[in-house]
Image (cartoon, grey):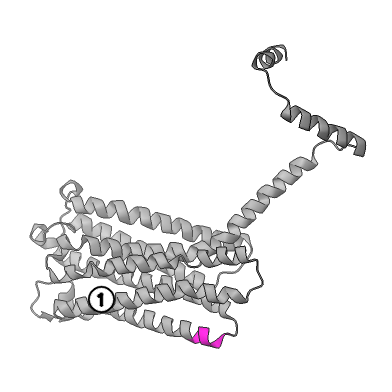
C-alpha cells in the first residue's frame, strides 16, 4: 500500500509537471503534423516515421511514470518519502529512465534513416551514417539496460533497502558522460550532413538553404544534450530524489527537442500546400469578377488608379457616407 504525497508539499514536483506535460504535448503536435503532412500527400509511412512514433510513445510513458513518482514523493528529500513507497518508487524510476533513454535513441535513429533515404549512391556518406547509428544505439541501449543490472542482486536497483552491492557512482557518472558525448556528436554530425547531401539536388539555392536549415534543427538537440551532461554529477551527490531535478528535466527535454527537430523538415510540404491552396482561392475569387473587353479593361484600370491616388477629404467623405 503506497501513500500519496500532496503536490502542495512538493514544489519541485510542480516544476516537473510544468515542464514535462507541455513538452510532451508540443512534441506530440509536431509529430501529428508530420504524420498529417504525409497522409495529406498520400505518402505511406516509412521506417523513420515508425521510429519517431515509438520515440514519442516512450516519451509519454516517461512523462506518465515521472508524474506518478511525483505523487509518491519524487522531488522531496529521500527521508521525506514514505518508506512504503520505496519499492514502487524505484521500479517506476527505472521504467521512466529506461523509456527516456530509448526515446532518445529512437528519435535520433529516425532522423538518421531519413538522411539515408537522401544519400542515394553516396557510399561514404551511407557508411558514415551507419556508423553513427551503431554508436548511438549501442551506447543508449546499454545505458538503458544498466538501469536494471547495475546492482547485485538486480532487485536492489529499484529497492535500495535490500542487501547487496551496486556499481560505484563514479562508474555510472563516467559512463553517462560517455553516452551523452556520443549522443551530442551524433546530433551535430546529423545536423551538418544535409548541407552536403543537398548540393547534388537540382533546386534553387534559396530552396536548398531553406531545406538544409530545416533539416539542421537537430543541432538544438545536441545543445540540450551538452547541457544535460553538466547535470550528470548529481548522481554522485546522493539524495537522488531531491538533487536530480535538473538531470530529469534535461533528460526529458532532449528527446522532446529531437522529435520536434526531426518533424520540422516534413512540415515544409504541408506549409507549401497550405500556401498554394490560399493562392488558388485568391485566383478563383479573381476569376469570378465580371470580364471586361480590352477597351473597358483599360478604362477600368485607369479609373482604379485615379481613385487610388485621389486625395481624400474627410468632410466630403463623411457626407458621402451619410448620403450613401
Residue 249: x, y in percent?
Answer: 28, 61
Q: Is residue 279 magenta?
A: no
Tag count = 1
Question: In this image, 142 relative to 281: left or right?
Answer: left
* Residue position marked by numbered label 1 in the rendering: 176
Tell me the element at label 1: helix
SS majority, magenta:
helix
Kindly identify the residue that appears in the image at 40 percent across and 55 percent down: 25
Residue 279: x, y in percent?
Answer: 69, 48
Q: Compared to 161, does 2 lie above or below? A: above
Q: Quadrant of the C terminus?
A: top right
Question: In this image, 117 relative to 295: left or right?
Answer: left
Q: Compared to 242, does 187 lie above or below? A: below
Kindly identify the residue that appears in the image at 60 percent across and 85 percent down: 121
Q: Compared to 176, does 305 lie above or below? A: above
Q: Quadrant of residue 123?
A: bottom right
Start-end of magenta stretch: 122-127
Amino acid at each position: 500500500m503506497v501513500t500519496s504525497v500532496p503536490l502542495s508539499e512538493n514544489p519541485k514536483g510542480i516544476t516537473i509537471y510544468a515542464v514535462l506535460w507541455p513538452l510532451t504535448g508540443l512534441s506530440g503536435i509536431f509529430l501529428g503534423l508530420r504524420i498529417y503532412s504525409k497522409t495529406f500527400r498520400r505518402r505511406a509511412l516509412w521506417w523513420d516515421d515508425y521510429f519517431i512514433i515509438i520515440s514519442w510513445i516512450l516519451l509519454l510513458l516517461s512523462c506518465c511514470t515521472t508524474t506518478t513518482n511525483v505523487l509518491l514523493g519524487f522531488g522531496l528529500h529521500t527521508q521525506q518519502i514514505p518508506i512504503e513507497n520505496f519499492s514502487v518508487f524505484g521500479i517506476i524510476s527505472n521504467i521512466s529512465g529506461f523509456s527516456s533513454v530509448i526515446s532518445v535513441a529512437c528519435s535520433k535513429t529516425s532522423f538518421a534513416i531519413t538522411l539515408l533515404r537522401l544519400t542515394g549512391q553516396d557510399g561514404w556518406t551511407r557508411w558514415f551514417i551507419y556508423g553513427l547509428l551503431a554508436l548511438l544505439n549501442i551506447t543508449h541501449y546499454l545505458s538503458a539496460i544498466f538501469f536494471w543490472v547495475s546492482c547485485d542482486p538486480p532487485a536492489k536497483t529499484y529497492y535500495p533497502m535490500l542487501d547487496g552491492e551496486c556499481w560505484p557512482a563514479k562508474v555510472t557518472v563516467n559512463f553517462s558522460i560517455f553516452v551523452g558525448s556520443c549522443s551530442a556528436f551524433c546530433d551535430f554530425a546529423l545536423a551538418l550532413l544535409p548541407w552536403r547531401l543537398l548540393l547534388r539536388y537540382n533546386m534553387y539555392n534559396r530552396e536548398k538553404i531553406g531545406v538544409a536549415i530545416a533539416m539542421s534543427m537537430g543541432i538544438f538537440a545536441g545543445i540540450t544534450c551538452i547541457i544535460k551532461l553538466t547535470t550528470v554529477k548529481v548522481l554522485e551527490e546522493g539524495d537522488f530524489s531531491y538533487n536530480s531535478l535538473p538531470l530529469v528535466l534535461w533528460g526529458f527535454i532532449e528527446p522532446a527537442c529531437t522529435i520536434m527537430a526531426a518533424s520540422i523538415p516534413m512540415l515544409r510540404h504541408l506549409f507549401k500546400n497550405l500556401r498554394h491552396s490560399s493562392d488558388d482561392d485568391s485566383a478563383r475569387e479573381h476569376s469570378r469578377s465580371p470580364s471586361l473587353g480590352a477597351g473597358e479593361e483599360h478604362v477600368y484600370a485607369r479609373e482604379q488608379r485615379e481613385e487610388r491616388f485621389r486625395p481624400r477629404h474627410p468632410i466630403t467623405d463623411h457626407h458621402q457616407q451619410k448620403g450613401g
